[in-house]
Amino acid sequence: MQPRIRGLHHDHVDGSLAVAKTLPELYELSGLPIPSAIASVADDTEELAKFFRNPHENLVKKFSLITGALQTEEAIRYAVREYARTRRREGYRYVEAYFAPQYHTKRGLAVRDAANAFYNAMRSADSDLGIKVFPHLCIGREADVETGIAIAKIALEYDGEMALNLVCDEAAHPPEKHLPAYKLTFGSKVKRDCHAGEWVAKEPAATYRARLAANIRTALFDLRCDGIGHAIPLADHPELVSYVVDHGVRISGCPLSNLACGAVKTIEELRIGELLDRGVCYTLNPDDDFFLPPMEEVVEKCDAVFRFTESQARQLEENVFGGAFAP
């Protein structure tokens, strides 16, 4: 039975099709020329998508073409509003949107100003567009420890109205690097999430999945996360599954992202049906639907592989709201 998903827990604003469609307007708002790499296709969404589609090729540089347009408060507010408007039009009632402010300071905007522009635009979308958007303030994990701490302090100021997340290059920057930032939020209302168990160094191959699992453990036990993004080998470890279930930790899965990026050979490896049957609060998500498969395809292909039962489909639908971070 194919589930009908009305919300997202894992959605990067700067990797969304909604924002990519507005690149010409965003560069204009930022007072910058459109980069030559995309100048000829910036007005053609399909051609632009083709340019971005291969996640193995210059992914960081491609992302910078989008974040490069989000260097003013006005541009950030415009992008967030278009993002929320698109998600509402697609039928979503609730989304958790990811934003890493450190990437929006190239023209002098402070991390705090970028974060505030993001948050205020989200709240405006709540009231004007009829969709609940819950913001995740993200630490791009290549940042130094001090920057991570500064971002955590901003999240704390919002007193539970904004989650803290850790994103990007897990292989070079494991979760423990930003433990000082996460420790600041212990005992607060701030929800903690972390991309963990997504990817690590390919070699030595014999310990690859064990090292993925080690990052999940760090996120659970040291960073005390309320949610984990990806968690690819979770089902291989019954003790971690039991902990996740017992402590109400939600898992925001991105199966087709994992497949497209080569993190799994088949989505069967994720054993989503087993996780649902064990009571894991697992949700399906697109990750970055501009250059990765959209949500409709995620649901369709996962259902074709796992053949969700009526109970599992209902769990996937209900987990969106049962596992929501919004107060």
Image (tube, grey):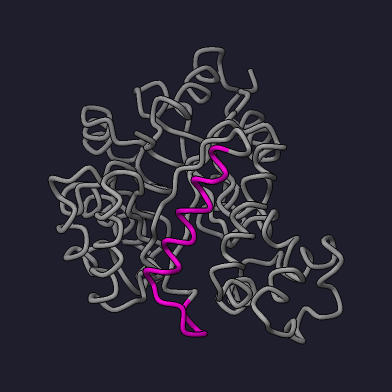
| Relative vertical location of residue 308 with respect to residue 81 in this rendering, above or below | above
Where does the C terminus fall, quadrant-wise?
A: top left
Which is nearer the eye, 77 or 50?
77
| Relative vertical location of residue 219 with respect to residue 47 in this rendering, above or below | above
Can you tell which quarter of the image residue 166 is in? bottom left
Query: Residue 100: image x %, image y %?
Result: 44, 65
| Relative vertical location of residue 75 with respect to residue 183 in this rendering, above or below | below
Overall secondary structure of the magenta section = helix
Residue at (59% x, 46% y) in the render: 286
Query: Residue 129: image x %, image y %?
Result: 63, 38
Query: Residue 238: image x %, image y %?
Result: 26, 34
Boundaries of the magenta span: 105-127
Residue at (29% x, 75% y) in the render: 147
Residue at (56% x, 74% y) in the render: 72
Which is nearer the eye, 252 or 205?
252
Left or right side of 66 for 25? right
Left or right side of 297 for 219? left
| Relative vertical location of residue 86 with respect to residue 105 in this rendering, above or below | above
Left or right side of 46 for 124? left
Query: Residue 36: image x %, image y %?
Result: 77, 87
Q: Is residue 136 magenta?
A: no
Residue at (35% x, 36% y) in the render: 250
Which is nearer the eye, 238 or 321?
321
Q: Is residue 108 magenta?
A: yes
